[in-house]
Image (cartoon, helix red, strand yellow):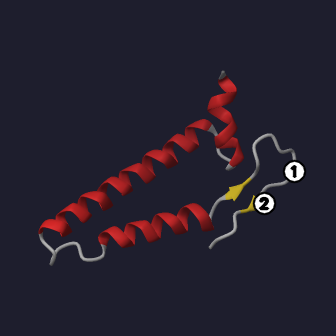
């Protein structure tokens, strides 16, 4: 059962607590970006780029700066490819 808590974080070279912190950070930023999108929907002159800026920043942080290793792999980590 413990393996379920550690497999995925290990696949991105993080501990469980590091991964939880990253996920909470991403979730908080997505929440703020989402609220900005709702505000923009009501008041089109406000929060003009906050939603797209949030997506772009999080994508860059997740894809460009993370190493990914297949779960159960003993090989050295491979750098994640960007689009």
Q: Which residue is mark 2?
A: 78
Determine which quarter of the picture holds residue 68: bottom right
Packing grade of label 2 (10 A; few <14, some 14-19, many >=20) is: few
| Residue closer to the observer: 20 or 41 | 41
Determine which quarter of the picture holds residue 19: top right
Residue at image position (62%, 31%) is: 5
Toward the right, the furthest residue is: 75
Secondary structure type for disc 1: loop
Q: Which residue is mark 1?
A: 75
Q: Vertically, is 43 above or below 68?
A: below
Residue at image position (43%, 51%) is: 25
Q: Position of residue 37 (x, y in %)?
A: 25, 64
| Residue closer to the observer: 80 or 42 | 42
Packing grade of label 1 (10 A; few <14, some 14-19, many >=20) is: few
Residue at image position (17%, 64%) is: 39
Q: Are marks 2 and 1 in contact (CB under 8 Å)?
A: yes
Secondary structure type for disc 2: strand
**Left or right, 57 with reference to 64:** left
Q: Which mark is residue 9?
A: none
**Left or right, 40 with reference to 26:** left
| Residue closer to the observer: 82 or 57 | 82
Quarter of the picture holding the C terminus: bottom right
Q: Position of residue 9 (x, y in %)?
A: 64, 42
Quarter of the picture holding the N terminus: top right
Toward the front, the furthest residue is: 41
């Amino acid at each position: 059962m413990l393996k379920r808590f550690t497999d995925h974080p290990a696949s991105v070279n993080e501990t469980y607590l590091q991964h939880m912190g990253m996920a909470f950070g991403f979730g908080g930023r997505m929440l703020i970006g989402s609220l900005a999108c709702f505000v923009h929907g009501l008041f089109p002159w406000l929060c003009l780029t906050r939603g797209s800026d949030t997506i772009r920043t999080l994508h860059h942080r997740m894809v460009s700066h993370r190493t990914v290793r297949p779960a159960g792999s003993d090989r050295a980590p491979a750098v994640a490819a960007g689009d």
